[in-house]
Image (spheres, helix red, strand yellow):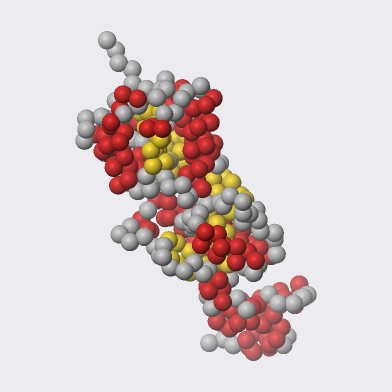
Amino acid sequence: MVTRKEVAELAGVSEATVSRVFNGLGPMKPATKERVLEAAKQLNYHPNAIAQSFARRRSGNLGVVLPYMPKVHLFSAFYFAEILSGIGEQVREQGYDMLLSLLTPDESLDYTRLYRSQKVDACVILGSRDTPQQRESLMQLQAQGLPFCLVNQSFEGLSFHEVDADHVEGSYRAVRHLQEEGYRKIAFLNGSPQYSNSGDRLQGYMKAMSEAGLEVPPELLLEGNYSRKSGYEAASGLWEHRDQVEAVFAANDRMAIGLMQGLRERGWIAGRDFAIIGCDDSDAAKLSDPPLSSINVPFYEMGKEAARSVLAGLLHGEGTKDTRIKLPTRLVVRQSSRAVIIND
């Protein structure tokens, strides 16, 4: 195995200089750095990753914190799979590794332990909820100057580094589309209020209904938990008020598909008896019967941007604290939301 000493001898420099080149430490003349890199290339020298991490006082890992949800195949869920793919691609491009950490809902939310154990240099946090414990833990990270980024979550009254999508505009466009198709009695199936995007989507829905001069009876505001099962269970409540419903906007595709299934069992067919739009533009939306109109949320790009920005702040000193990056959404129209024209 080629040693650092051999590289130093070929480049005509000291071993300490070779170490500084590969660990990015201290000022360095470009010509000297070039000689060292050329010598390493000729000798096929690869520095020891463990030794590098000690020299840099870094682990070389970007931590990704995920919620642990029993009986849920987390990595097959479209939302998490897309974000993790984006993070993984960006981490690979920047020469880092990704370390996953799963937290149960009742587990103490001490994010700082990941940094104290030197397992990670920065964190991207997914699936966080607006709870007192969550707020306190994130404020501790911020107070200690530890780099982190939230994805798809914000906290009212607090300012963190966040990457999000424009859920307000996406929801607004979905409801406006239903109105343009001629629907006026539009119900809304939302997710848990502990997630900021639930509030954003409600805001977009209410804005579109208000601008159209349409009232929203309380019975048309339904709540699930973003699972297909909760959408299926919401069908019974919606069915009781079916005379007040022409269309539905659901806050994600899984709930929309569950709702479609529950109403189909009662004889109500999406795209025939009522219109429906979901949110996420998942693979399941394309394969549902009928194909589900949906708001495309750029989860993959959100993951890439979260990893890029938090590592840029760590490696290059770019300012990433207390900033909110918001990516655009777009409406994808399929059969489930188009008005049905019946010829006599």
Residue found at x 48% / y 50%: 195
* Residue at the extreme top of the image, as rendered: 344
Q: Quadrant of the C terminus?
A: top left
Does residue 3 appear left or right of residue 35 in this picture?
left
Of the pair 222 and 127, the residue shown nearer to us: 222
The image shows residue 302 at horizontal and vertical percentages of 53, 51
- Could you say which quadrant of the image residue 255 lies in? top left
Of the pair 212 and 339, the residue shown nearer to us: 212
> How many labels, in total?
0
Residue 210 appears in the rendering: yes
50 versus 335 height, above or below:
below
The image shows residue 282 at horizontal and vertical percentages of 39, 45
232 versus 75 height, above or below:
above
Does residue 333 appear left or right of residue 291 in this picture?
right
The image shows residue 256 at horizontal and vertical percentages of 35, 39
Of the pair 36 and 109, the residue shown nearer to us: 109
Residue found at x 64% / y 89%: 5
Does residue 122 appear left or right of residue 226 in this picture?
right
Residue found at x 59% / y 46%: 326
Does residue 71 appear left or right of residue 86 in this picture?
left
The image shows residue 234 at horizontal and vertical percentages of 31, 40
- Could you say which quadrant of the image residue 263 lies in? top left
130 versus 26 height, above or below:
above
Residue 46 appears in the rendering: no
Residue found at x 58% / y 50%: 156
